[in-house]
Image (spheres, rainbow, N blue to C red):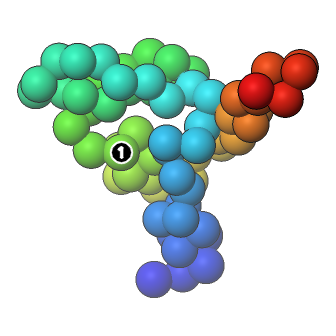
Amino acid sequence: MNQQKEAAARINCYRCKHFYVTWDSRFPRGCKAFGFKTGELPSAVVLKSSGQPCMNYVEKANGLKKDGR
C-alpha cells in the first residue's frame, strides 16, 4: 500500500465535522460534504471511488461550550 492510501486509511470519519449518523439500518453512516449515505466509513468509499483520499476532512471542534462544559 502506498503512503497516500495509508493516509486515507487513517482518516477517522467519526472525528470529521461532515460525518453524521443516518439511523438508516442499511446505510448508517453519511457524509454531508459529499452528500451520500453508506454502510462503510465514508472515507473508505471516497478512496474506492476516486482513488484519492478524502479531501473534505475537517476535524470537529472539541465540542466544549465557551464556559468549558
Q: How many labels sit on residues?
A: 1
Q: Residue 25 location, x and y as percent?
A: 11, 25
Please, is residue 17 above or below residue 2 in the view? above
Please, is residue 25 above or below residue 7 in the view? above
Q: Residue 36 location, x and y as percent?
A: 36, 21
Seen from the viewer's position, the closer of residues 17 and 64 is: 64
Which residue is label 1 attached to?
A: 41
Can residue 65 be seen by looking at this rendering?
yes
Please, is residue 1 above or below residue 60 in the view? below
Quarter holding the C terminus?
top right
Who's the residue at 17% across and 18% down the image? 24
Please, is residue 30 above or below residue 42 in the view? above
Give the residue at the far left of this rendering: 26
Can residue 52 be seen by looking at this rendering?
no
Q: Horizontal placement of 34 versus 3: left or right?
A: left
Who's the residue at 49% across and 29% down the image? 19
Q: Quadrant of residue 65?
A: top right
Who's the residue at 51% across and 18% down the image? 32
Q: Residue 23 location, x and y as percent?
A: 23, 18
Q: Horizontal placement of 68 versus 51: left or right?
A: right
Give the residue at the far bottom of this rendering: 1
Quarter holding the N terminus?
bottom left
Q: Horizontal placement of 32 versus 57: left or right?
A: left
Secondary structure type for disc 1 = loop
Q: Horizontal placement of 18 versus 21: left or right?
A: right
Mark 1: give few (<14), some (14-19) or many (20+) Cα within 10 Å: some
Q: Specify the amino acid type for callout 1.
A: Leu
Who's the residue at 52% across and 52% down the image? 12
Q: Quadrant of residue 63?
A: top right
